[in-house]
Image (cartoon, grey):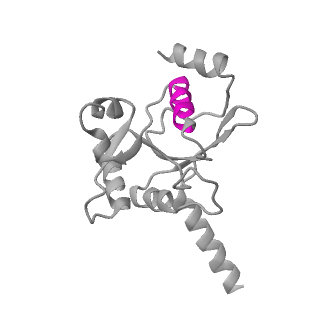
Amino acid sequence: MKKIYRFIFFRLMGWRLNGTISPGLKKCIMVVVPHTSWVDFFIGVMARGSIGLEMHYVAKKELFRFPFGAWFRWMGGAPLDRSRAENKVDAIAAIFHQRKVFRLAIAPEGTRKKVDKWKTGFYYIALKADVPVVAIAFDYGKKRLRLLSHFILQVILTMTLKFLRQTTLA
């Protein structure tokens, strides 16, 4: 199946991949930008199949009912109950704790329109679930998908706080 995805993604669609995601990285949040079109989902599916790693997303639980529920789960979907008063960050962090492998793709814009600021949910989910963040960028002009090395927010926050303490004490 991976060969079919690679043929479609690289040969027919003409895309290239720059970078990798380590197969040993079993849990992470993949911040995928920009999310400007419904086509992003299909490019992402082709890229995921070409990379060959299990990747996931969350969507409203209503999508996981018959007749499409099995397909959404097979595609890596995890149902999220939006009707409860439950904090969504806590609900998604719980999914991370329940699964051995969960690489969550999130579009931080929260919409398919051009935005000036990202929503911060991915940041709080990463902190709560204690997972690293992987940045992924679609370059439509060059038909290139860039995968950047993962980083751990806790480490960055600790280093930033240490730096701030040192500069304010000096």
- Figure disc tally: 0
Residue 168 picture location, percent across and down:
68, 84
Is 12 magenta? The answer is no
**Is residue 75 shown above or below 168?**
above
Residue at x 47%, y 15% (from the top left corner): 1
Which quadrant holds residue 54?
A: top left
Image-based side of 42 in relation to 55, left or right? right
Position in image of residue 163 (x %, y %): 66, 73
Q: Quadrant of the C terminus?
A: bottom right
Q: Residue furthest right?
A: 142
Tell which of 62 and 3 is nearer to you.
Answer: 62
Q: Is residue 37 left or right of residue 140?
A: left
Is residue 62 or residue 51 the one in the foreground? 62
Q: Residue at x 55, y 23 (%)?
A: 50
Q: Is residue 75 above or below residue 106?
A: above
Asked whether, in this view, residue 87 is left or right of residue 52, the answer is left
**Magenta: main secondary structure:** helix
> Residue 109, how many percent across, how many down?
56, 55
Image: magenta residue range: 40-51
Please say whether residue 42 is one of the residues in the magenta stretch: yes
Residue 111 in the image: state x and y as whole percent: 53, 53
